């Protein structure tokens, strides 16, 4: 290997943990490709449960500058890749290819974890290394859709939260879509960490004949005080300053772009959410991956907000990272569609706008998987209560809750059962859930608010 053209060396002390550094380097004119390699001392994985060593995140800004949501952002790979190529014609995912302008670029170095001995780093940059080996997605395999119980007309099955090779996942977006079809999903959200480019449905002859789930493009804005998702936004949102003020500003920017914004996995090892309510989000991911993975704490976090009169929408997401090595990585059990968010989509075939409208209106419920159970909640204005329909949950326990307590409980007698529950005196809302005999949640609804009627 040739000598590097630029070497950036330095150190982070434990008191500099979680404070991003922008380290400048000069790129001369006429360059067409950059290679960046980095290494550091006492390296440990980024899993939030591991401590005692170092994890250093990498990102890159070009000569157009480091402004939040600005055009200079070329990508962020966390600690997932220690060698990347960024060029005119191609770049290692998740980095953005394009012209290599002359001027001051910045390596973004994020000391996510700094152990007791400090973190010594070395970044090597080579200009025009003539690297070949552009990564290419494989041709699609036609998916086989499973035979699943029908949803209520107008409702679709969605997994809103997954990761591809455009962050720390191991599959291409197209592979995720094929796998989502195979799981029986109608809608897939791909939400890569701090993605500089939105995911796209692959095009070309091999894809045109396949019936694919609708892709809802998103990004998981991954900060050192918690993660939030934005679907349907425009570009990237600033993740570098882990404060409530900066996070709130980035969320408001995303919402001004039309994005639907959710706090992700507010539970221990989620990682947790450190910003309170300052940010003004629209939804909470109350169910991330398999239910027993501490999701009861995320549900309680959401319910606490309902009690205070806020109305964030409850949603779920599998947070799938790995299709090819399902036993590997920090989320070993995640599987597409576990859980599934069922969404009422106005007007027939789902569109991105329709899915986001259903979510915004809270017309959704979450279940353990694509096969259900299904749990529909509709307001009954004239009777002053909620009408529930429970499908494929015979023998499970249905409970209905207002802001104070459980107000109704029954064993579900039939595979397709409907029941109406009136608002008790003083109830502000009613929400329902279904659990198995061991207390593991199988499905949960959003609240039906007393004043508003409607709602699922
Ligand atoms: Zn996350």
Image (tube, rainbow, N blue to C red):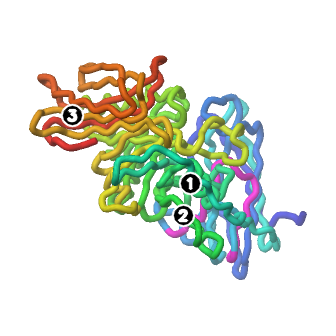
Query: Alpha-carbon distance for marks 1 and 2?
Result: 8 Å
Q: How crowded is mark 3: few (under 14 residues within 10 Å), some or many (20 or more)?
A: many
Report which residue position mark 2 lands on.
Answer: 211
Return the mark for residue 317. Answer: none
Query: Alpha-carbon distance for marks 3 and 2?
Result: 36 Å
Q: Give the range drawn in magenta.
A: 71-89
- Secondary element type, mark 1: helix
- Give the quarter of the figure containing the N terminus: bottom right
Instruction: Point out the tag, 3 or 2, that comes first from the N-terminus.
Output: 2
> Please, is residue 252 above or below residue 425 in the view?
below
Where residue 345 sits in the image (x, y, percent)?
34, 55
Report which residue position mark 1 lands on.
Answer: 181
As drawn, which residue projects farthest toward the top? 438
In this rendering, the count of numbered labels is: 3
Q: Disc 1, disc 2: CB below 8 Å?
A: yes
Residue 178 on the magenta span: no
Return the mark for residue 386. Answer: 3
């Amino acid at each position: 290997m040739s000598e590097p053209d630029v070497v950036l060396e330095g150190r982070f002390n434990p008191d500099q943990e979680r404070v991003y550094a922008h380290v400048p380097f000069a790129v001369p004119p006429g360059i067409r490709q950059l290679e960046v390699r980095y290494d550091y001392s006492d390296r440990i994985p980024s899993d939030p449960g591991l401590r005692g060593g170092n994890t250093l995140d990498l990102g890159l800004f070009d000569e157009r500058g480091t402004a939040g949501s600005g055009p200079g952002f070329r990508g962020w790979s966390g600690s997932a890749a220690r060698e990347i190529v960024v060029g005119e014609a191609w770049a290692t995912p998740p980095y953005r290819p394009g012209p290599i302008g002359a001027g001051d670029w910045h390596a973004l170095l994020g000391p996510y974890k700094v152990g007791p001995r400090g973190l010594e780093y070395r970044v090597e940059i080579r200009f025009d290394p003539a690297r070949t080996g552009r990564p290419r997605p494989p041709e699609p395999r036609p998916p086989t859709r499973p035979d699943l119980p029908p949803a209520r007309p107008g409702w679709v099955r969605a997994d809103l939260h997954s990761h591809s090779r455009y962050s720390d996942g191991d599959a291409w977006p197209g592979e995720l879509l094929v796998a989502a079809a195979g799981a029986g999903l109608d809608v897939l959200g791909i939400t890569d960490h701090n993605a500089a480019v939105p995911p796209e449905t692959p095009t070309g002859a091999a894809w045109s004949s396949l019936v694919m789930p609708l892709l809802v493009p998103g990004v998981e804005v991954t900060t050192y005080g918690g993660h939030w998702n934005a679907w349907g936004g425009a570009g990237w949102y600033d993740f570098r300053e882990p404060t409530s003020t900066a996070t709130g500003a980035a969320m408001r920017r995303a919402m001004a772009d039309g994005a639907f914004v959710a706090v992700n996995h507010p539970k221990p090892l989620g990682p947790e959410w450190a910003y309170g309510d300052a940010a003004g989000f629209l939804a909470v991911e109350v169910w991330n991956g398999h239910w027993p993975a501490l999701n009861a704490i995320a549900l309680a976090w959401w319910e606490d907000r309902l009690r205070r009169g806020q109305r964030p929408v409850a949603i779920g997401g599998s947070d799938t990272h790995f299709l090819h090595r399902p036993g590997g990585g920090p989320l070993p059990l995640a599987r597409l569609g576990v859980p599934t968010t069922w969404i009422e989509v106005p007007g027939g075939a789902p569109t991105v706008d329709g899915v986001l409208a259903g979510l915004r209106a809270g017309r959704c419920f979450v279940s353990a998987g694509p096969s259900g159970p299904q749990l529909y909640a509709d307001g009954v204005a004239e009777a002053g209560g909620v009408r529930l329909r429970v499908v494929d949950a015979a023998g499970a326990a249905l409970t209905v809750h207002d802001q104070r307590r459980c107000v109704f409980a029954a064993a579900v007698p039939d595979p397709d059962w409907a029941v109406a529950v009136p608002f008790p005196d003083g109830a502000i809302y009613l929400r329902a859930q279904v659990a198995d005999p061991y207390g593991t949640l199988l499905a949960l609804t959003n609240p039906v608010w007393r004043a508003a009627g409607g709602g699922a």
